[in-house]
Image (spheres, grey):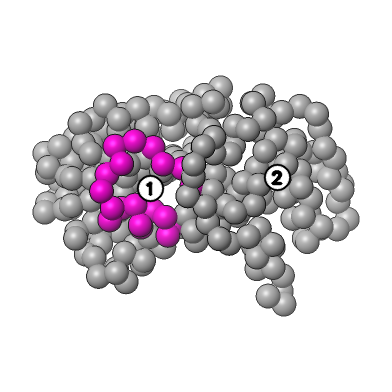
């Protein structure tokens, strides 16, 4: 099977590329550095010749609403147009659990636009919505840090290891299109503050975690269970404690 991965040289993309090649598939890791620019359309048509599956793991360099919408709209339209011409049988994108409930956040609004483009394209597709990565917890902690205090919400949280995100993406890429949305999550669910507190204790014991009573995520008020799957989800096996151990110099 020939698979083109847009964003194939990034954190998740390079891992997916490696996994699919190990399974014997022909994989093109698409990025501007490899001559495939989904934002300008350069190299797309040639790359998609005789291709079975396209995995779009591209990501906006800006989280601001305007630039993010421009990026996902432009890239989405360029890829989907090229796919229709190439008769691609499966288009897969990576999105975020709770995207449809966080459109007050510019980046999430842009991701929802990306999802809607895929749904209306006419190309068989799979949308994989992932919970937040375990590796993103340091960013959450940094965003809530005020001096020696880390202020964080107690909204529901179920982080997944980036390694298992790549594993699921590879698995879904070579499966039949879902023509719908599937969700993936980590094995551990609990209040966000508990995960952040474990991270802070493991990395900076001089700080203390302060739990606030507002259900917020980066300043946006959200329902308590926005960031976790609502129904059935595919669950990873790497626990958050394993991620914390990986941060230790003795690991």
Residue 232 lies within the magenta run? no
Q: Which one is closest to the eye, mark 2 or mark 1?
A: 2
Q: Quick check: 105 left or right of 54?
A: right
Residue 169 lies within the magenta run? yes
Asked whether the viewer can see residue 30, the reply is: no
Q: Which dot marks residue 224?
A: none
- Place of residue 100 in the rendered image (x, y in percent of width and height, measured from the top left): 49, 27
Quadrant where the image shows the N terminus: bottom left
Q: Residue at x 69, y 62 (%)?
A: 241
- Place of residue 48 in the rendered image (x, y in percent of width and height, measured from the top left): 17, 50
How crowded is the residue under tag 2: few (<14 C-alpha within 10 Å), some, or many (20+)?
A: some
- Give the residues in magenta: 166-184
- Place of residue 122 in the rendered image (x, y in percent of width and height, measured from the top left): 20, 31
Q: Residue at x 49, y 41 (%)?
A: 232
Q: Quick check: 166 left or right of 160?
A: left
Compute the Cα span from label 2 to label 1.
28 Å
Quadrant where the image shows the C terminus: bottom right
- Place of residue 186 in the rendered image (x, y in percent of width and height, measured from the top left): 57, 52
How crowded is the residue under tag 1: few (<14 C-alpha within 10 Å), some, or many (20+)?
A: many
Q: Earlier in the sequence, mark 2 or mark 1?
A: 1
Q: Which residue is mark 2?
A: 190
Q: Which residue is mark 1?
A: 57
Q: Nearer the viewer, residue 185 or 141?
A: 185
Quarter where residue 166 is shown: bottom left
Q: Residue at x 77, y 60 (%)?
A: 203
- Helix, strand or loop at disc 2? strand
């Amino acid at each position: 099977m020939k698979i083109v991965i847009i964003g194939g040289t990034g954190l998740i993309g390079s891992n997916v590329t490696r996994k699919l090649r190990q399974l014997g598939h022909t994989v093109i890791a698409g990025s501007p550095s490899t001559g495939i620019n989904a934002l300008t359309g350069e190299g797309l048509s040639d790359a998609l010749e005789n291709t079975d599956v396209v995995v779009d793991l591209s990501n906006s360099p800006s989280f601001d609403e305007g630039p993010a919408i421009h990026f996902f709209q432009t890239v989405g339209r360029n890829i989907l147009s090229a796919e229709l011409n190439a008769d691609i049988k499966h288009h897969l994108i990576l999105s975020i659990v709770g995207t449809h409930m966080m459109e007050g956040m510019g980046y999430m609004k842009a991701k929802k636009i990306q999802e809607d483009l895929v749904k209306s394209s006419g190309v068989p597709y799979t949308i994989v919505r992932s919970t937040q990565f375990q590796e993103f917890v340091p960013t959450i902690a940094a965003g809530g840090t005020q001096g020696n205090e880390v202020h964080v919400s107690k909204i529901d949280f179920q982080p997944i290891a980036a390694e298992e995100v790549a594993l699921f993406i590879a698995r879904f890429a070579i499966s039949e299109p879902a023509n719908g949305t599937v969700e993936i999550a980590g094995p551990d669910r609990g209040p966000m503050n508990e995960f952040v507190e474990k991270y802070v204790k493991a990395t900076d014991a001089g700080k203390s975690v302060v739990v606030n009573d507002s259900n917020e995520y980066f300043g946006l008020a959200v329902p308590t269970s926005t960031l976790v799957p609502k129904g059935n989800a595919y669950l990873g096996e790497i626990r958050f404690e394993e991620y914390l151990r990986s941060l230790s110099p003795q690991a």
